[in-house]
Image (cartoon, helix red, strand yellow):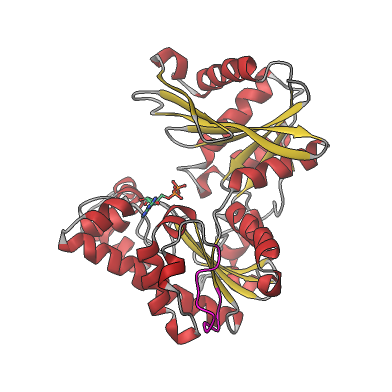
Amino acid sequence: MTGRVVLVLNAGSSSLKFQALAWDDGELSLQFRGQIEGIGTQPRFSARNAHGEAIENRELTPAQASDRDACLQTLAEWLRERLEGRELAGVGHRVVHGGVRYSRPVRVDRDVLAELEALVPLAPLHQPHNLAPIRALLDRRPDLPQVACFDTAFHRTQAPLAELFGLPYELYEAGIRRYGFHGLSYEYVARKLREVAPEVAGKRIVVAHLGSGASMCALHDGCSVASTMGFTALDGLPMGTRCGSLDAGVVVYLGRDRGMSMDDVERLLYQRSGLLGVSGVSNDMRELEESDSPRAGLAIDYFVYRIGRELGSLVAALGGLDALVFTAGIGENSPGIRARVGERAAWVGVEIDPALNATRGATRISTPQSTVPVFVIPTNEELVIAQHTASLVS
Ligand code: ADP
């Protein structure tokens, strides 16, 4: 192999996901994707080629994945063998928070890294993990171009009104505002929509990103106007283990009257709530759909109900609706959830075609009579990161 390669890294609390894309003549094409998961417990390395075939699946020794640095070494060695002859042009990182400042991706040097580290208190569960490989690579390969792509950046087109909380204004000025997340996914969907449905792509769209993290975004002319996630990735829809919208008074009550510490409250809201908390069965939608437990049914009912209510709110922010899009794990793969959301959205002109909805790979799933067309667009956040990286590196 010759030519160049762009590496995309998505570092979470216990996993390091990666994609390696060949970059030839301005075109990016996936070569490998994979992950090191179970970091800190039972580390395992798995990878697939561009056709989705498994080419690696093995346990790692604790030493091979003891920390971020060791994981990067393990990955670098594996890639060096596979990408023999290809030069690494740059590394693109998914970084959850870009704060007020970053409305687009940025080449990272030590000064930028210091700024991003200052945002850790805004996303304590994600930001430190996202930044760790950047720091490790800056130390080890200072000449290697690195690019940070933010989940918040896409939403910086929102009007100040949409970012505001009803708190004293100095808190807004201090950065306590609605940032919105999943922006790389919305950016991909907004672009893809221009290809698959150019007749609506510039109009008023609601995208439902329904994965283990879930949010919805109102787009006008391909730009974010409002979103369900706010200051943190906790607000809006109930998720796998996160609660979604919550009366802030509950937090005060849990602390004062139930004596819970802030750490306990954080664990409750982020890790023990949402689909898992309501169902008591699982945070995984597939397991809930297969379960006959009444509380699993209740968790699904609540998920769908909240999607319907948030849809109403986003349609109001847009002043109407011209298309609805489903994406991410649940949005792409669960006809049952899509059908139920469609029923709740009938008032706005949505009518989902049962046969199209059940057809894997169908892009448009609404009936011809539906006044609001409905699409399923599989998201690809990594491709957005690779594209930004390639363009900032060149
Ligand atoms: P994330 O990237 O946020 O970890 P994903 O976008 O992969 O999450 O979505 C994970 C969710 O998608 C899980 O709740 C999983 O159960 C759900 N999911 C995946 N496939 C299906 C399916 N065939 N039917 C229903 N839900 C599915």
On whether residue 346 falls in the magenta region, the answer is no
Judge from the rendering whether residue 238 lies leftward or rightward of residue 278; answer left or right: right
Point out the image quarter for the C terminus: top right
Judge from the rendering whether residue 146 lies leftward or rightward of residue 281; answer left or right: right
Q: How many marks?
A: 0
Point out the image quarter for the N terminus: top right
Residue 95's x, y, as percent?
59, 43
Residue 132's x, y, as percent?
56, 30
Residue 257 visible from this viewpoint: no
Residue 368's x, y, as percent?
54, 80
Q: Is residue 45 above or below residue 114?
A: above
Residue displayed at 77% across by 23% down: 143
Residue displayed at 58% across by 45% down: 119
Q: Report the front residue among 305 and 30.
A: 30
Q: Which residues are magenta?
A: 363-373
Residue 41 figure quarter: top left
